[in-house]
Image (spheres, grey):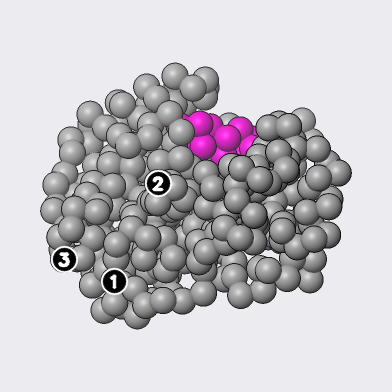
Amino acid sequence: MSATQRPSGDRLLFSIAAANGGAVGRAAALEKGVSPSIIHRRLKSGLLVPVTSKVYLLEELRDSRSLLFALCTAYEGGAVSHRTAASLAGLPVRESPPHFLFPHGGRPDLKAHPLLRDLVMHETRSLPEVDVRNFFGLRCTSVARTLCDLAPTEARHFALHLVETALSKALVSDEDLIACLSARKRRGVRGLRQFASDLATVLRDEAYPESVFESELLAGLRGVGLGGLVPQFRPPWYEGIRGITDIGHPPSDSIIEADGRGFRQVTEAHDNDRRRDRQATANGFVVIRVGYREFHRSSERICLEIKEICERRAADKLLRSGS
């Protein structure tokens, strides 16, 4: 049957699917004028194949990427990720089952969604828009985020090869990669220490005046409404001038370090930083380190994240004290 001979409801379904890689969202179909009864009949006939309860594939337009389009339609806060995102970005990775990054707690039940049985599923608590790019019409993790996500699971030499390839093809900048790595480390993602050491051998190493960055970070935190900040904070376990920290937030027992060091310097100082962080933890404090590249890439988002952490810790502290 030609497109012009199809019933109007089917023509609308084909139009939606053709513009979205073969995927049809129920909400979009209803908005375009497709009735619920037509959707129900097309599901029974097999023209539409359910991926989730509200997203379908149009069988006649289905191809190798249609499932990814359906997932991007169904999970707005998710993204194509890991090896699949790397391949779409042009990096040399072997073909593998599709990878998709779901918002935390949003992983679907495979028993209820059999089309997803070959999908490699990941979850994240943090996928800011700065870590998202569009490749071939698909919402994907950026090259910087993809490289950071792959580093803990791929062989060391292969992860570094992907970095060098991405840099040589101008798929990612030194600044974006360092900023993303800084953000992932700050959120406590495991398995990145060796990757950071390897990156220090291939990335440009530039410092930024720490006094300037400290002032910028302090102004940014005050700008989002975080009060109680103390510049040049002297913690209770004060150990001389080297023990003075950049910014303290006593109401939440938090220390905020503005790190303007070059990437290689940061990597080489890892053990000393860890020692100081453990000392703070032993005294009931948390240390939040912010790299200048990460801050300059997305200052307001980072300040809001720090504000949320400090306010949550301050509330917990008051609750424990019974105030």
Q: Nearer the viewer, residue 152 or 34?
A: 34
- The vertical placement of 159 against 302, above or below, is below
C-alpha span from label 2 to label 1 = 18 Å
Return the residue at label 3: 201
Left or right, residue 151 beside residue 25: left
The image quadrant where one finds the N terminus is bottom right
Mark 1 is on which residue type? Pro
Residue 150: x and y in percent read 40, 68
Decide whether residue 310 is among the magenta residues: yes
Quadrant of the image occupied by residue 118: bottom right
Residue 287: x and y in percent read 46, 47
* Range covered by the magenta-colored residues: 303-314
Quadrant of the image occupied by residue 195: bottom left
Residue at screen point 83% across, 52% down: 41
- The vertical placement of 4 against 281, above or below, is above
As drawn, the label of residue 148 is: none
Whether residue 126 is visible, yes or no, is no
Disc 2 crowd rating (10 Å Cα; few below 14, some 14-19, many 20+) is some
Disc 1 crowd rating (10 Å Cα; few below 14, some 14-19, many 20+) is some
Return the residue at label 1: 92
Left or right, residue 237 beside residue 211: right
- Nearer-N-terminus badge (2/3): 2
Disc 3 crowd rating (10 Å Cα; few below 14, some 14-19, many 20+) is few
As drawn, the label of residue 133 is: 2
Q: Are marks 1 and 3 in contact (CB under 8 Å)?
A: no
Residue 111: x and y in percent read 79, 71
Residue 18: x and y in percent read 54, 48
C-alpha span from label 1 to label 3 = 21 Å
